[in-house]
Image (tube, rainbow, N blue to C red):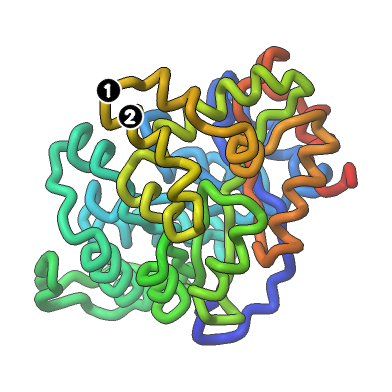
Amino acid sequence: MSARAKSDRQSGWGLTIPLLGVPLAEHADIVRALPDLGYTDVWSAETNGADAFTPLALAAAWEPTLRLGTAIVPVYTRGPALIAMSAAALAAAAPGRFVLGLGASSPVIVGNWNGIAFEQPFRRTRDVLRAVRTALAGERVDGEFDTFTVQRFKLEQAPTPPPPILLAALRPQMLALAGREADGAILNWLAPADVPQCVAAVANPDADIVARVFVCPTADAEHARSIARLLISTYITVPAYAAFHDWLGRGEVLKPMHDAWAAGDRAGAAAAIPDAVVDDLVVHGPPEVCAERVAEYVAAGVRTPTIALLPTPDGAPTLDLLRRLGPVAR
């Protein structure tokens, strides 16, 4: 499936795995149950927990119908040949069900944790996209890109069909690249009202649009907002996310947070985030209310909202909670 060719995939409903508080080996029964609960997708994340590929490889063996996606594989921490090999292996394990999500990641993950220079993120992402797409199509990758050189690499066995590639994108240039050269975009840290602006920047009506939606399913608003403020102050002070929310129109309302963060006042930065912003960016409330809020992303133009569950006072997620958060509950 390519963004240059019309996709007939209807809206889906995803879950981010692994779930917090559940050991990876204990996800088998959860993953097997998801289709009956209305879920169509599982997507991984790669920060400082599991890598992007291992949970999906297990899910491919546990359940034969779910779509599997990486959100995201950083374009710096693996070379383009290794990304292509990992994607080809997972695409072979789950034919027609795997989506490779690529993204620039962040200076903390790339530079501070992996010791790799975080330079020219747009060009690096574009170059990796082009090299990996070429490799997954079964063609030889050979030549100089702006940010690296590849000499005569070709996959031993390219997957048929090659998996679609989505780009994590926050601002117009990367969103346009996602619509022009990838198969769509992965959105993050936005409200339903922000979706149309991002979709317009993708500028391709056939592009796949996936959004990670942070969900804290509890009626304890104080608990949910406390977790949300910590996450928002940590993520949205990253320069790319700060610029994203400036572009979305939140620059002034988030300025006190940025000022406190720049002064080294982490607690003050979290406290400076207005409730309205917290409630826009993190879904919380009883599970059925959360499901309705997640559905607003679909109504706004997201093809697959992907729930990222945050901790609640009730402990590890249960199948009953996932059922109540799923589209079947609506």
Identify the residue at image location x=10%, y=69%: 149
Q: Residue visible at 42% across and 54% down?
A: 246
Q: In x, y percent, where is residue 199?
A: 57, 70
Q: Residue at x 42, y 50 (%)?
A: 72
Viewer-proximal residue among 294 and 3: 294
Which percent across, then down, holds residue 214? 60, 39
Secondary structure of the residue carrying tag 2 is: helix
- Decide: few, some or many residues near mark 1? Use Cα within 10 Å; few <14, some 14-19, many ≥20: few
- Image vertical order of residue 203 relative to residue 173, above or below: below
Q: Kindly indicate the quadrant of the structure image that contains residue 312.
A: top right
Q: How many marks?
A: 2
Please provide percent x and percent y for residue 25: 55, 25
Left or right: residue 160 versus residue 128 is: right
The answer to whether any part of residue 64 appears in the image is: no
Labels 1 and 2 touching (C-beta < 8 A):
yes
Q: Is residue 6 visible?
A: yes
x then y, percent, for residue 49? 41, 29
Specify whether 116 is left or right of 4: left
Q: Which residue is mark 2?
A: 261
Q: Which residue is mark 1?
A: 264
Residue under the point 36% across and 39% down? 237
- Quadrant where the N terminus is found in the figure: bottom right
